[in-house]
Image (tube, helix red, strand yellow):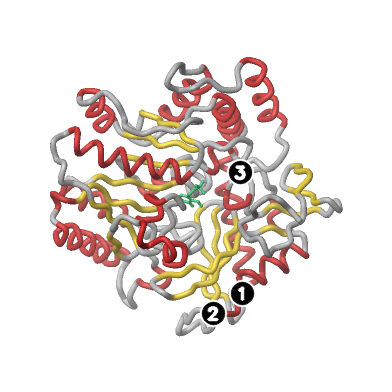
Amino acid sequence: MSHVFHRNPRQQLDFAVRGQGIELFDQNNKAYIDASGGAAVSCLGHGHPVVIQSIKDQLDQIAYAHSSFFTTRAAEDLADFLAQRSPGDLNHVYFLSGGSEAVEAALKLARQYFVEVGQPTRRHFIARRQSYHGNTLGALAIGGNAWRREPFLPLLVPAYHVSPCYAYRDQREGESQEHYAERLAQELDHKIQELGAENVAAFVAETVVGATAGAVAPVKTYLKRIREVCDRHGVLLILDEVMSGMGRTGHLFACAEDQVVPDIITIAKGLGAGYQPIGAMLASSRIYDAILAGSGFFQHGHTYMGHATACAAALAVQQVIEQEHLLDNVLARGEQLRAELRSALADHPNVGDIRGRGLFVGVEFVQNKDTKATLDPVLKTHASLKKQAMQNGLLMYPMGGTIDGVHGDHVLLAPPFICSDSDISE
Ligand code: PLP
């Protein structure tokens, strides 16, 4: 019996013993193509020598120093790198150890900002029904995945939800993308007015929805309209790019494609590419300056924030991606992957939609292509697909999302940025 408390204790897991490039190997030396990087994490593949060397070099100098006593060269250099490439003035980088921590920090920073600037009634968060922002209590409170929230509802602060931007299911027949975006912006506007703008701190959204829906990108102009609504009401815009950021969509920050600058952005998975656990929250100067001029202290923190070894690994990952122009490959290989999936699967009676941006690709399954009725949740098609794919030596991220009580089955493909034309075809 294993003494590891596995998340799913009834499941028999094989051992991952080795990783090289786009492949992982188990204890029987069976190879798996890592086409999802876990949950869109391993964007540089496995065993990258430059990243491994940077970790060794950092360990030779200093592994860790507590952030309330010291800063480190690794943390400063990674923050410089990100700040120089972030949209707008998102220049203030707060390091954490993962996505949920980054989202918690963003929520608390938004709240503290309004306390600092003398608007203490602003305390509500609005997010979207089809969303996942993490499993810690604050992040779970704003998330829109009913199944994940259900057992913990009595512990969650109230949060408010509006419709996601999910064109495949919700854009009406004959409705232009612009009108659809406008309709969603109006819904947010109404929700803010209903709560009273003076009570609303921030609107939180994934730039491209990951786990709950499978790479659902917003229609053009959606985020711009949302930004306008937030500005009109003095509400902060927090974009969660924990999964979609750090090059996954072909842009370092996914919102660059939408030409929108949020007030706070969260990143994690691709930042350290799985070589070390690391996440970050980037805040705008307006927010940072308010803390600086106000209490002078952000009332939040974790033991491992700004961990030197994690920062060194993440900097090496990001430098490799930039120096090897891997985001060009992300765009080209992403187009190829969607095109090949469409030619192989578009006519399948249970394949409803094939979508995504860059190497962030979702395939949604339906019972009926015309009605878009979701698959029977009891069948857990996503789980059997995962099993079958693993038998065939392929790793992909399946999810049976629960959206307003409706189960939608999909798989998410998030292959590493280093994959070649023939890897994608395989
Ligand atoms: N936000 C988004 C958009 C995510 O996809 C995830 C994880 O899947 C999280 C937050 C939580 O990140 P973590 O699992 O690192 O805590």
Q: How many marks?
A: 3
Residue for point 60% across, 17% down: 62
* Residue type, numbered disc 1: Thr
Type of the residue with mark 2: Leu
Which label sits on residue 381? 1
Q: Are marks 1 and 3 in contact (CB under 8 Å)?
A: no
Measured along the vertical axis of the image, is residue 317 above or below residue 32? above
Q: Which quarter of the rendered picture does the C terminus lie within?
A: bottom right
x then y, percent, for residue 79:
45, 26
Kindly identify which residue carries mark 3.
43
Residue 17: x and y in percent read 78, 45
Residue, x 80% and y 53% (percent of image)?
Answer: 31
- Distance (Cα) linking label 2 and label 1: 8 Å
Q: Nearer the viewer, residue 152 or 344?
A: 152
139 is higher (above) or lower (below) than 327 = below
* Quadrant of residue 177 within the rendered picture: bottom left
Q: Earlier in the sequence, mark 3 or mark 2?
A: 3
Query: What amino acid is at disc 3?
Result: Cys
- Residue identifier under label 2: 375
Choose mark 1 or mark 3, whichever is in front.
1
Q: Are marks 2 and 1 in contact (CB under 8 Å)?
A: yes
Query: Is residue 144 in view from this perspective?
Result: yes
Element under disc 2? loop
Secondary structure of the residue carrying tag 3 is loop
Q: Nearer the viewer, residue 31 or 175?
A: 31
Q: Quadrant of the N terminus?
A: bottom right
